[in-house]
Amino acid sequence: MKASLNARTIIVALVVAGLLLLPVYTTLSGNVFGLTLFTRIIIYALAAASLNLIMGYGGMMSFGHAAYLGIGGYAVGILAHEGIGSGFIQWPVALAASALFALVIGALSLRTRGVYFIMITLAFAQMAYYVASGLARYGGDDGLTIYKRSDFGGLIDLSNRVQFYYLCLGCLFGGIYLIWRIVNSRFGMVVQGLRSNERRMQAIGFPVNRYKLVCFVIAGTICGLAGALLANNTDFVSPAAMYWTRSGDLMVMVILGGMGSLFGPVLGTIAFLLLEEALSQFTEYWALIMGPLLLLIVLFARGGIDGMLGRARRG
Amino acid sequence: MAEPLLRVEDLVCRFGGVTATDHVSLDVNSGELHAIIGPNGAGKTTLISQLTGQLMSHSGTISFAGQDITRLPAHRRSRLGLARSFQITSLLPDFTAADNVAMAAQAHDGHSFRFWGDARKEKGLRDAARSALSRVGLEHRADTVVSELSHGEQRELELAVALATKPQLMLLDEPMAGLGATESAQMVKLLQELRREVTIVLVEHDMNAVFALADRITVLVYGRVIACDAPAAIRQHDEVKRAYLGDQHVVTRHD
């Protein structure tokens, strides 16, 4: 047990060190592509970590989490399009819009359980997708090009790849730290208790829906931040960011890494996106290989990558 | 005469065409141990669920400590001091015994919208958990995950969780279900001690336990109260013998 616990700590430490030092390598080797790829990975890892908060810890299987990627992205894109380039305005709007969306769809969908919850979150995300497709002024189906990245005065230059990379990494580590504090707090205990046995939590005196809703909003807000980062990364935002397959990708990243494990979503996202990248070099039918691989993981390694590294369940 | 702690009047609950609770009226006095017995399917668990708010009643009223709670949701009733244990053990299986009890203590210690401090390191909650666990004799199992506890230990943990909510009234739904003879005897002893501190409504099939513990017994058959009296009188009650004890004798003879 102790040895396997160490294996996990070592892997996580290596991954953290690798992420911290990556720009050094890419700058020396001039491998710009590697930096861009990992910037994307880090942003998705933040989104996956936020989904893990509700799905892994809270047991709420949201199938519409990509909606916040789009909402955060469109907040940045639309404001930029209207001439408001300041990140100090764009980003708070992105977070607030995501929180508001989470509040509304959470209040409606958390009345349901199980498959119905999955379906209703999916439906709301698809609604957001179609609304974005209908925004003719902002590119509609074709999406919206962002000509200038969010402006944070002299504080940080998002157009500088390395600076932007470290900003994303800071957001990821900050997000994970926040989630770590939350899941171990009184609030987090309640949320995890709800995953374990909702009826029991109600019987001992918790008004369960309130806690679920707040957790849902926190997760949505964090994912909205990932959306703002993503829009800046690609200089572009389109309805495709909210499409249900994207929500599915996020779920796969979480499950692949290990639900209810703090660092699992990061490992899952790295594995998923690197695999996608590598397989698509060989064949355009990369999904044919990816599918069975995921199936094997789900069948034989229930705890995902994090579970394979060995760990007392949910510490 | 003091106001009863729990007063149930004309309570009804229907499932489709079946009236599971048929105009039940019942008083539970402060400090008593009130047993509810009845054959399988008499509606005992339904009644408990109505009292604790997991099921809403179709008509009738429930008042607790002088307050009408008929329409209150389960979590509000728990806050007022109404605790329950479940017939089929219902704990948080992937948490430790201590976590389960601490959670109950936390539920009754203000709201839980606290996002920062480590809840497992809060002394108040841990102490409350430890003392409730030691009440039921489980302190040595505090750090064991519930799914690894024996069935008997899980039944005791159910009680500890109920105790940690600092209840005025505990509704215990078959706490001896599935226990062996030694474990049952232990549970009876435990209930003997608890009844000195808290009013208890006990649903139980183990007649020895019921007659040993109860101050009063209510007999429920097909959702109706057919008798409510002291144990000695219930033993002599003709209708009870026929409807309940008698039935069982018939059944055992056929075995």
Image: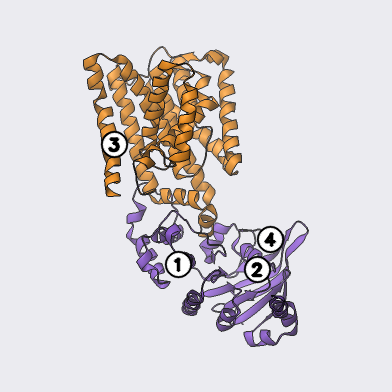
Chain colours: A orange, B purple
The nearer-to-camera label among 1 and 4 is 1
Q: Chain of mark 2?
A: B
Q: Tell me the number on the disc at residue B57.
A: 4
Q: Nearer the viewer, mark 2 or mark 1?
A: 1
Q: Which residue corresponds to mark 1?
A: B153
In the rendered structure, are the residues bearing label 4 and label 2 in contact, judged by CB atoms less than 8 Å apart? no
Chain containing the residue with disc 4 = B
Q: Are marks 2 and 1 in contact (CB under 8 Å)?
A: no
CA–CA distance in space, label 3 to label 1: 38 Å
**Separation of marks 4 and 2 at Cα, in angstroms:** 14 Å
Query: Image point 72% across, 68% down: which residue?
Result: B223
Q: Chain of mark 3?
A: A
Answer above or below: position of B18 versus B9.
Answer: above
Can you identify the residue that label 3 sits on? Answer: A11
Q: Quadrant of the N terminus of chain B?
A: bottom right
- Residue A96 visible, this orientation: no
The image quarter containing residue B134 is bottom left
The chain letter for the residue carrying disc 1 is B
Identify residue type, mark 3.
Ile
| Amino acid found under the numbered disc labelled 2 | Lys
